[in-house]
Image (tube, rainbow, N blue to C red):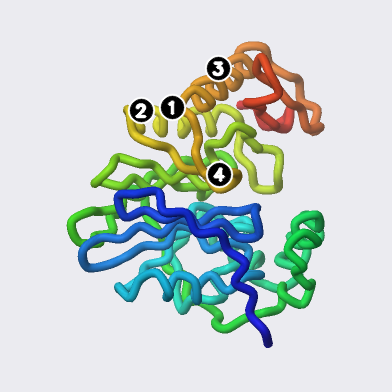
């Protein structure tokens, strides 16, 4: 079966490379002196593993920020990946072709642009071994480490990885100009807020990288999203299950949440 490698490669400096699959979802390759880590694995329609092998021959550790199909689907190209146990059940489900096929259908405008076939959702080399991440777990790459920080919100097992060399944070989808807590498995606004504050405190003056767009998340976007969440908690929203949105002064940042998942 033909393997697509339609992946944009951007050198961010300091041994960090952004890998963007089909102009939609990001993964990040972080290299140390003796090892490398891939943070997130994309949707799996493209052969991300082949691209990574062309960039480094160092032993590779694959770390997943959360178990949605566009971040964990590409784990099928790797023999093992690390995922927080709170996302384990959903992660195993999203590794299966139906979830990856649904991802392609939802983003059919990208599928059309990049001429990706639905058959790509069924590409598979491995059934990866899934290892369980723990809050505070550190991965030594030689001369730099990546620390795991649990920040539930976008999913119950969402984590951030902190690079010791640059201080950079890799946040997956938990911190974005569009905060989405209304998906199945999303936590309460209050829970997300605790993790977001922890993320902001960890960031200091360092860069924050996210799962979509060009990967760069301004700290001002996080600060404003935190303010939106604080307003939601202060105002209350009843017990309706409907999805609601609280926006900033402009279109973004925006906070999507279910009214029965506030506190």
Instruction: Using the image as rendered, state which of residue 148 and residue 190 is in the foreground.
Output: 148
Instruction: Using the image as rendered, state which of residue 187 and residue 23 is in the foreground.
Output: 23
Position of 159 compared to 7: left or right? Answer: left
Q: Residue 256 sits in which quadrant?
A: top right
Instruction: Using the image as rendered, state which of residue 207 and residue 172 is in the foreground.
Output: 207
Residue hosting label 4: 214
Residue hosting label 3: 227
Q: Are marks 3 and 2 in contact (CB under 8 Å)?
A: no
Establish if 14 lies above or below 205: below
Between tags 1 and 4, which lies in front? 4
Residue hosting label 2: 201
Q: Are marks 1 and 2 in contact (CB under 8 Å)?
A: yes
Q: Which mark is residue 183?
A: none
Q: Residue at x 78, y 32 (%)?
A: 243
User: Where is residue 87 drawn, in percent x and y?
Assistant: 55, 56
User: Where is residue 237 drawn, in percent x and y?
Assistant: 73, 19
Q: Residues within 10 Å of mark 4 (few under 14, many from 20)?
A: some
SS of the residue under disc 3: helix
Establish if 215 lies above or below 71: above
The answer for how far apart the CA atoms under marks 1 and 4 are is 23 Å
Q: Are marks 4 and 2 in contact (CB under 8 Å)?
A: no
Q: Residue at x 43, y 74 (%)?
A: 54
Q: Residue 238 sits in which quadrant?
A: top right
The answer for how far apart the CA atoms under marks 3 and 2 are is 15 Å
The earlier-in-sequence mark between 4 and 2 is 2
The answer for how far apart the CA atoms under marks 3 and 1 are is 10 Å
SS of the residue under disc 1: helix
The earlier-in-sequence mark between 3 and 1 is 1
User: Where is residue 11 drawn, in percent x and y?
Assistant: 41, 53
Please identify the quadrant where the C terminus is shown: top right
The earlier-in-sequence mark between 3 and 4 is 4
């Amino acid at each position: 079966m033909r393997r697509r490698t339609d992946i944009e490669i951007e050198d961010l400096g300091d041994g960090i490379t952004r890998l963007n699959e089909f102009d939609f979802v990001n993964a990040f390759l972080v290299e140390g002196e003796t090892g490398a880590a891939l943070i997130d694995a994309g949707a799996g329609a493209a052969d991300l593993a082949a691209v990574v092998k062309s960039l480094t021959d160092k032993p590779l550790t694959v770390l997943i920020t959360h178990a949605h199909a566009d971040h964990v689907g590409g784990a099928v190209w790797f023999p093992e990946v690390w995922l927080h146990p709170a996302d384990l059940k959903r992660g195993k489900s999203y590794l299966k072709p139906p979830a990856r096929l649904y991802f392609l259908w939802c983003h059919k405008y990208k599928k059309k642009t990049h001429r990706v076939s639905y058959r790509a959702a069924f590409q598979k080399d491995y059934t990866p071994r899934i290892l369980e991440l723990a809050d505070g777990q550190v991965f030594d790459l030689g001369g730099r480490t990546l620390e795991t920080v649990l920040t539930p919100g976008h999913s119950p097992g969402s984590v951030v990885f902190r690079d010791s060399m640059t201080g950079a944070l890799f946040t997956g989808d938990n911190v974005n100009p569009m905060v989405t807590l209304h998906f199945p498995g999303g936590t309460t606004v209050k829970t997300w807020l605790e993790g977001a504050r922890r993320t902001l405190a960890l960031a200091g003056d360092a860069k924050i990288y996210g799962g979509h767009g060009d990967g760069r998340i301004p700290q001002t976007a996080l600060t404003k999203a935190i303010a939106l969440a604080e307003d939601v908690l202060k105002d209350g929203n009843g017990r309706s299950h409907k999805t609601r949105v609280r926006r900033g002064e402009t279109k973004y940042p925006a906070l999507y949440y279910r009214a029965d998942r506030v506190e």
